[in-house]
Image (tube, rainbow, N blue to C red):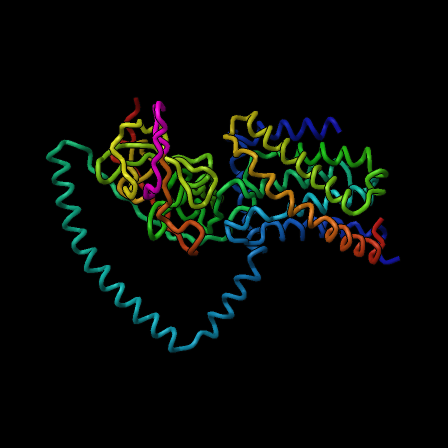
Amino acid sequence: MKNAHARWVIWSSLFVGLILYVAPLPLSWRWFRPELPLLVLFYWNLALPHRVGIFSAAVTGLTLDIINGSAVGALGFGAVISTLFILLNYQRIRQFDTVLQSVAMGLLVGLALIIERWLHGFLGMAGTGLGFIYSLPATILFWPLVRNSLRGLRRYYEVE
Amino acid sequence: MLVVLALCLSALFVFRENPRIAPLRTIMIDATATVYEIAVAPRDAWRGLTGYFQSRRALQEENGRLRQENLVMQGQAQRLVSVLAENSRYRALLNSSELIEGDVIVAEIISVSADPVRHLLVLDKGSDQGVANGQALLGAAGLMGQVVTTGATTSRAMLITDSTHAVPVQVVRSGVRALVAGVGDIDQLIVRHLAATTDIRIGDVLVTSGLGGRFPPGYPVATVTDIYIAPGAAFATVTAVPLAHLDRGRHVLIAQYAAADATVTP
C-alpha cells in the first residue's frame, strides 16, 4: 500500500487534462480539440462513483468556465447534470463495448455543452450557434485513449 | 446535489457584473493565465532554444533589415507629424473635435482561448501596465479586437471575428458608414444592415469610423470580398476578410484611446 487512497492521482490527472486542453493549437484547428477535462472527469465518475461525484464535477466545470472566460457556473451546471447521469447509470455504461461507450461519452459531453450554451442564452450572452458540436467527433475518438491510460494509472497507483 | 446546482446557478448571476467581487475576478483571470502559461511552456522553451542557437549571420541579416525598415518608418513618421498638424488645423477649421491619440502598449499573446466558438486571446499585460476593458487591439496590418477582461498582469481580448463582436466602420472610398460583425470564422466578417442601394464594391477597404468612441478612427479593418443583393431584399449581404493577421504573430498593440468628446453624455 503506497498511499491511503492515492487521490492525488485523480486531481493531477484532471489538471493534466486541463493543461492539454488549453495547449496552443492554430485557430483553424480548434474544432478538433477534444474536451479532455470533461472526459477525464467522466472516467473517474465511471470508475470510482463513490469518490468522484457531483462536487468534483462542479469544481471541474467552474474551472473550465473561468478558463474559457464564459459565464462562471454555466459549464459547472452542465457538468453536474452529465455526472448525475453517469452516477445513476455507471453500472450499465461500464458494460458497453468501446464504440458504444465512446458515443455515450460524446453525448454526455454534448449534453454538458448544450446546457452551458443554453444558460448563456438565458443570460443574454449572444449565441454562438451549434459550433460546439464540431469538437464532439474528436471527443468520441479520444475516449478509448483516455479510458485506457487512466485505467492503467488507476491500477498502478491503486486509486480507490 | 440540488445545493451544488443552486450554487452554480447563483454563481452565474453573482460573477457577472457585481463590482464587489471585481478583485476576485482579477485574481481568477490571472490564475487562468498561469494555466495557459504552463500549457505553452514547452513551445516557449523550444522557441528559446532555437533562438539561442540562431546563427550570428542570421541575426546580423535580420538586424540590417530592421535598420533599413526603421529608417523608412522614421522617414514616414516625419511626414506623418506634418500631416497630423495639418489635419488638426483642418479639423479646427471645420469646428470638429480634435482627436486625441493615446499611447500604445505592446503586449505579447500568451495563448488563444481553448473554447473553439469564442475568439479570445490571452495577453501578458494587465491593469498594472495600464490596460483597461474596451481598449482597442491593433496588429501590424489592422484592427484585431478589443480588451474584454483585465487581470492585474494579464488580460483577455476578443477578436473582431468573434460572433459576438461588432465594429463601427466606414468605407474609405465612399465614406459610407456600416457595422462589421464577426461570424465565428477566423477569416470572415459580415457587414451588417447595408441597404441594397448602398455604394459599396468588392475590394473596398473598411476602416474604423470612431463612432461609439471605443475604437480609434482610421484603422483598417477589412476588405469587402463579396456582395450579394437578393432581389426584393432590403439589405445587401456583404462579406469581408479581416486585414489583420489574426492567427499569426506574437505581439499586438493595445491602443489607449480617448475621443476628445468622449465625456459628453446624451
In the image, A125 versus B240, the foreground residue is: B240
Q: Main secondary structure of the magenta part?
A: strand
Q: Residue B91: percent from the left, percent from the top?
A: 15, 37
Count of numbered badges drawn on the protein = 0
User: Would you identify the image quadrant in which residue A92 lies?
Assistant: top right
User: Would you identify the image quadrant in which residue B216 lies?
Assistant: top left
Point 45% across, 45% down: residue: B186
In the image, B243 versus A36, the foreground residue is: B243
> Horizontal placement of B52 versus A138: left or right?
left
> Horizontal placement of A120 versus B125: left or right?
right
Point 80% across, 42% down: residue: A46
Point 33% across, 38% down: residue: B215
A81 relative to B56, above or below: above
Point 50% across, 65% down: residue: B47
Q: Which residue lies most toward the right here?
A: A1
Q: Which residue lies most toward the front here?
A: B231
Q: Residue B41: percent from the left, percent from the top?
A: 56, 59
> Horizontal placement of B243 versus A97: left or right?
left
B115 relative to B57, above or below: above
Q: Is residue B195 magenta?
A: no
A80 relative to B77, above or below: above
In the image, B42 versus B239, the foreground residue is: B239
Q: Residue B222: percent from the left, percent from the top?
A: 34, 43
The N terminus of chain A - image quarter: bottom right
Q: Is residue B232 magenta?
A: yes
Magenta-colored span: B221-237
Q: Residue B198: percent from the left, percent from the top?
A: 27, 30
